[in-house]
Image (cartoon, rainbow, N blue to C red):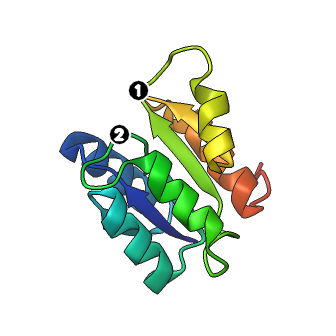
Amino acid sequence: MAKILLVEDNEMNLDMLSRRLEKRGHQILIATDGAQGVALAQSEQPNLILMDMSLPVMDGWEATRRLKGAADTQHIPIIALTAHAVAGDRERCLEAGCDEYENKPVKFPQLIAKIDRLLGIGGES
């Protein structure tokens, strides 16, 4: 299916999301901080990025701005994953360059719908 970069520092979230996405046939790349995420996105050119916004080394806000500001990675869709559920956070994620936004704890069917839409995968009946 698709190559998805999962940028997440929480081990439980990493494990749950990577296993469930692999079951759907996706190839999963993993980064545990924003700087590693930027480097992997540049070298691996994934089809989509799931970006935690609260990361060590470089946060997801800065990592997203760098990816969307670089000619070689600006085309890659980014879905923000965040526990921030404060009013205005969705808008802040979108302003940073994210294409979509998903609150934690992640509702997997909702996340899959967003992934499929951004990858152009049609609904199967």
- The dot on residue 26 is none
Can you give x and y, in whole percent of width and height, for residue 108 in the image? 50, 37
Where is 76 relative to 123, above or below?
below
Q: Quadrant of the N terminus?
A: bottom right
- In the rendered view, does 46 fall on the left or right side of 82? right
- What is the quadrant of residue 32 in the picture? bottom left
Other residues around mark 1 within 10 Å, as few (<14) / some (14–19) / many (≥20) = some
- In the rendered view, does 8 fall on the left or right side of 25? left
* Residue at figure coordinates x 63%, y 81% from the top left: 72
Q: Earlier in the sequence, mark 1 or mark 2?
A: 2
Which residue is nearer to you in this view: 5 or 2?
5
Q: Name, please, the residue furthest toward the top.
A: 87
How many badges with numbers are in the image? 2
Circle 2 residue: 54
Where is 5 relative to 91, above or below?
below
Residue type, mark 1 in image: Ala
* Residue at figure coordinates x 56%, y 56% from the top left: 65
* Residue at figure coordinates x 45%, y 32% from the top left: 106
Residue type, mark 2 in image: Ser
Can you give x and y, in whole percent of width and height, for residue 41 in the image? 47, 74
Where is 23 relative to 113, above or below?
below
- In the rendered view, does 72 fall on the left or right side of 40? right
Other residues around mark 2 within 10 Å, as few (<14) / some (14–19) / many (≥20) = some
Circle 1 residue: 83
Q: Secondary structure at mark 2?
A: loop
Q: Name, please, the residue furthest toward the left.
A: 11
Q: Are marks 1 and 2 in contact (CB under 8 Å)?
A: yes
Q: CA distance from mark 1 to mark 2?
A: 9 Å
Can you give x and y, in whole percent of width and height, for residue 79 in the image? 58, 48
Q: Secondary structure at mark 1?
A: loop
Which residue is nearer to you in this view: 62 or 10?
62
